[in-house]
Image (tube, coloured by chain):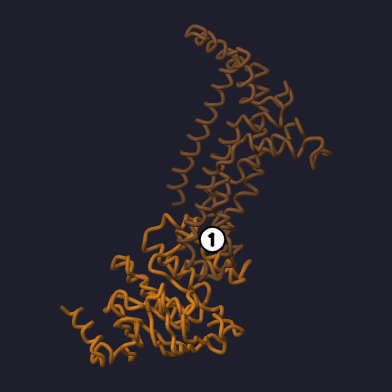
Chain colours: A orange, B brown
């Protein structure tokens, strides 16, 4: 998927990772490996550290302790993208938002135009490509944020509760896009509150409890027979 | 002591001056606009990038820079006038340029007066936007310089209001232009200095006429700014 030269950002290996903010520990003792092509879902209650973990893995936050290795690199490689719960779009047209991201990645000219077009098409946003991004509906804005990430052809795509503020129809559209992006070879790392969504999409689950990894299992096992007490309680709470 | 009747007579004469495009009045208004618009443009070229840079960059002493910018917003025009006067006077470091008592000196003084205002207000606006955009832009791999430029463009409608605030301050101030321009008839006489002079001479019609023009200009500008902002909000979100 990614151009040959920058396809070295996987696997992502975290060793003894910890993050604290203002003296409060948010994540502790995180050891994990993220392999190419896998859809890993980060689950856990509010405040369990899901968003922080994604930001650490994406390189937006520096860990307080521990090390992170992206493939053979010690610094965050290109070829990653992130979609946030609330899309942040620039005050310009939808297509210009995608072109801006491509420009930062060094993709310009006719090549960039083609990618913008393809990304808008994949997101079903061709008709609104010329409209200002910030007046699109919430669902359209999140699809545009995904299209922007997709146009970058990332090796790894991080998604932090991308459907948390969307209605069911918009959520379906976003899930379809994520499946589409994954089918093209992008590794997915996503957090969600929506267990049904995790069941539909996840290959692998990382369950966080109070800032630690309580369990890490294939999705099928996680939902049928969770091994940790915290995960069992979490899943039972959801069934009530 | 002017009475109500002299006031109304003066207003009538002032209205005639405005309606008839009195050449002297037009010349004074024209110079005022030219000086203050040029100063606003120059101050924008300095203040907006400076404000955006301070908003986005993290460096030692940043808090002191912000406090200084905010304090300089209240710079007294007469102090700016005095400083520019000292710089440009024949014995001063820039005396050889021969700029004192010219419109250029007035532009310099007003630029110094309002550049900190533009910088401080832009810093606040861009920093608020940065709080919202930071993670997304960093995720896309933006550097500090590009972030500042992106945010300046994305906050352009709010910054237009900042420019108007700066222009309003420039065109309404008396002290600095009086000291470095000298209020020379036909050369450096602007609306505010003329109003001050004519009032002290007791020639109220011209002073009142200019006063009406000045207030109308400021009102017009602010209504335009308001309308532009609500249009932009609806159009661009």
Give the residue displayed 55% in from the left and 54% down from the top: B66
Query: Residue B73 occupies which quadrant of the picture?
Result: top right
Q: Is residue A167 left or right of residue A122?
A: left
Residue B167 x, y percent position in the rendering: 58, 37
Give the residue displayed 77% in from the left and 37% down from the top: B88
Q: Residue furthest top?
A: B5
Residue A214 x, y percent position in the rendering: 31, 88
Q: Identify the residue position indicated by label 1 in the image.
A: A96
Give the residue displayed 63% in from the left and 17% down from the top: B198
One can see residue B158 in this view: yes
Image height check: is B90 above or below A44? above
Which residue is more in the foreground, A152 or B64? B64
Which residue is more in the foreground, B233 or B63? B63
Which residue is more in the foreground, A109 or B119? B119
Which residue is more in the foreground, A160 or B206? B206
Q: How many marks?
A: 1
One can see residue B149 in this view: no
Q: Chain of mark 1?
A: A
Q: Residues within 10 Å of mark 1 (few under 14, many from 20)?
A: many
Residue A239 x, y percent position in the rendering: 18, 80
Q: Is residue A174 left or right of residue B197?
A: left
Image height check: is A134 above or below B173? below
Residue B18 x, y percent position in the rendering: 58, 17
Determine the secondary structure under disc 1: helix
Q: Is residue A167 left or right of residue B63?
A: left
Give the residue displayed 30% in from the left and 80% down from the top: A44
Q: Residue furthest left?
A: A240
């Amino acid at each position: 998927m990614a151009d040959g030269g920058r396809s070295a950002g996987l696997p992502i290996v975290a060793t003894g990772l910890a993050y604290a903010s203002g003296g409060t520990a948010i994540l502790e003792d995180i050891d994990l490996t993220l392999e190419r092509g896998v859809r890993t879902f980060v689950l856990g209650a509010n405040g369990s550290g899901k968003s922080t973990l994604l930001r650490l893995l994406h390189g937006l936050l520096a860990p307080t302790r521990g090390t992170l290795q992206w493939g053979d690199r010690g610094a965050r490689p290109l070829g990653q993208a992130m979609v946030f719960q609330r899309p942040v779009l620039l005050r310009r047209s939808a297509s210009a938002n995608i072109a801006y991201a491509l420009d930062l990645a060094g993709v310009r000219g006719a090549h960039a135009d083609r990618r913008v077009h393809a990304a808008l098409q994949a997101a079903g946003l061709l008709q609104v490509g010329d409209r200002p991004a910030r007046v699109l509906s919430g669902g359209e804005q999140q699809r545009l944020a995904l299209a922007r990430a997709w146009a970058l052809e990332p090796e790894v795509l991080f998604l932090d509760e991308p459907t948390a503020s969307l209605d069911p129809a918009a959520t379906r559209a976003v899930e379809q896009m994520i499946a589409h992006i994954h089918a093209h070879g992008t590794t997915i790392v996503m957090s969600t509150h929506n267990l049904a969504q995790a069941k539909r999409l996840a290959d692998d689950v990382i369950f966080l409890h109070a800032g630690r990894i309580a369990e890490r299992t294939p999705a099928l096992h996680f939902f049928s027979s969770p091994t940790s007490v915290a995960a069992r309680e979490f899943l039972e709470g959801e069934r009530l | 002591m002017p009475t109500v009747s002299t006031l109304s007579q003066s207003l009538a004469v002032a209205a005639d001056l405005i309606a008839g495009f009195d050449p002297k009045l037009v010349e004074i208004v024209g110079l005022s606009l030219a000086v203050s618009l040029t100063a606003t443009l120059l101050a924008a070229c300095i203040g907006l990038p400076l404000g955006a840079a301070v908003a986005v960059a993290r460096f030692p002493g940043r808090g002191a820079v912000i406090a200084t910018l905010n304090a300089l917003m209240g710079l007294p025009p007469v102090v700016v006038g005095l400083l520019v006067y000292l710089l440009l006077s024949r014995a001063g470091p820039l005396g050889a340029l021969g700029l004192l008592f010219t419109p250029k000196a007035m532009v310099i003084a007003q630029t110094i007066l309002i550049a900190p205002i533009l910088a401080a207000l832009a810093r606040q606006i861009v920093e608020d936007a940065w709080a919202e955009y930071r993670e997304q832009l960093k995720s896309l791999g933006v550097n500090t310089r590009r972030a500042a430029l992106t945010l300046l463009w994305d906050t352009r409608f709010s910054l237009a209001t900042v420019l108007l605030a700066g222009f309003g301050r420039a065109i309404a101030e008396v002290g600095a232009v009086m000291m470095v321009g000298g209020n020379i008839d036909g050369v450096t006489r602007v609306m505010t200095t003329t109003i001050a002079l004519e009032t002290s001479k007791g020639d109220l019609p011209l002073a009142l006429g200019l006063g009406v023009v000045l207030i109308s200009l400021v009102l017009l500008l602010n209504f335009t700014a308001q309308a532009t902002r609500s249009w932009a909000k609806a159009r661009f979100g």
